[in-house]
Amino acid sequence: MKVLVIGPGGREHAIVRALSADPYVKEVHCAPGNAGIAQDVTTHNIDAQDPAAVLELARELASELVVVGPEAPLAAGVADALIEAGIPVFGPTKAAAQLEASKAFAKNVMAAAEVPTAMAHVATNRDEAASALDDFGAPYVVKDDGLAAGKGVVVTSDRDEALEHAEACFAAGGTVVIEEFLDGPEVSLFVICDGKHAVPLSPAQDFKRIFDNDEGPNTGGMGAYSPLEWLPENFVEEVMDRVAYPTLREMEKRGTPFTGVLYCGLAVTKRGIRVIEFNARFGDPETQAVLARLKTPLGGILLAAAKGQLDDAEQLNWSPQTAVDVVIAAENYPDTPVKGAVISGLEAANALEGVHVMHAGTSADADSNVIVSGGRVLAVVGLGDDLAAARKAAYAGVAEISWDGAQSRTDIALKAERGEIVVADQSK
């Protein structure tokens, strides 16, 4: 099978790596890719958000499966163009991708499907936003209704800051969703869907804040780990029964069946599981940790989903090891990242046992040096027999890599390693 992966980031590098290890996949291409992906497979410099350009490349390569990684191409209708041309594509249509592209749409779907989620108000102006903030009280949760690359959410106890974020969204022509704050640890669960059937992957937890101790502004994600030993028994089964399948049925009922990854961002609260958000694709950086442990060949799963041939009873095979990935970001990220610095230590990091480096915001300069070209630059993945060993491996890899202004958190998965994550007793 020939597979074309669409996207430029760390998530796509992880997908490319998993597909390249699949014995049934004979050829992998990526567009546009990055410097690390280009070292592994052939890349093509096209506009990933242009449906016509993606379709032309897929035809040129005789691709038998196209995997769309990021949210923007999905929202632009890339999957629609491929489906119309009869090319199997793993990723939802533009209409189905509204589950991520519009938080208000997602809330509407969840309400109709009786999916447990945070109470919310949609606000279109300052007065509505102020009223909603007062209804819910602090901590305040304000979300840009549209796509914001993981950085459109503000959670704060400062009402002025919350209102300022809402007004910035209004000034940009958008609306906001204001929600009640959900207590409890967060979990990411990827669910592979074919419109009717669904297969869950292993749960993960990511870290959105830029600094240690979950301080500073939100980012696209500064690290992740999987599996989560502290989750309640039958957690995945409950999410499938109460969240994934009801959502799939509602989307099918609306005439927009969902094919691809339903990313369920969840809070394990004292009132039970609550959906924080849906995404319509693999999450980044959770994908780097989750796919590092997947033993079942990825290509076959994605092709079955694309063709509507998933088996609900599919049992995926997972490595017993734990995976931790730590993101190294550019100076001044998540504001305006400083680009152009030459990255050193990549070979040394990749040579470490149990370590591999996934590229995100990288490119090559005229001298073939790998340089910083984005905000989140690399994700260093460590595998180990337990969480402590996986963290040690990942941070050993981080220690080998450097450039001026590089920044990373030092506490990814540390609370879990120390047994400090507490799940509320939901029986009370």
Image (cartoon, rainbow, N blue to C red):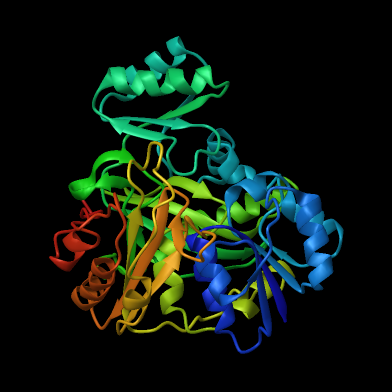
User: Between residues 21 and 419, which one lies in front from this camera angle?
Assistant: 21
Q: Nearer the viewer, residue 28 or 317?
A: 28
**Residue 153 vertical position relative to residue 281 in the rendered view, above or below:** above
x and y percent of residue 44 in the render? Answer: 69, 63
Please give the name of the residue rendered at 59% of the width and 45% of the height, measured from the top-left corner: 99
Looking at this view, name the residue that lies furthest to the right.
85
Whole-percent x, y for residue 108 in the image: 57, 36
Please state the total of marks drawn on the protein image.
Answer: 0
Q: In x, y percent, where is residue 250?
A: 64, 49
Does 76 sit left or right of 426 as displayed?
right
Residue 303 seen in render: yes
Q: Nearer the viewer, residue 141 or 135?
A: 141
Above or below residue 337? Residue 15 is below
Position of the N terminus by quadrant: bottom right
Name which residue lies at 39% across and 20% down.
132
Q: Quadrant of residue 61?
A: bottom right
Q: Residue at x 69, y 50 (%)?
A: 47
Whether residue 313 is visible, yes or no, is no
Q: Residue at x 18, y 62 (%)?
A: 414
Residue furthest bottom in the image: 23
Residue sticking out furthest to the front: 367
Q: Which x, y percent locates residue 142?
A: 40, 29
Seen in the image, is 177 located left or right of residue 280?
A: left
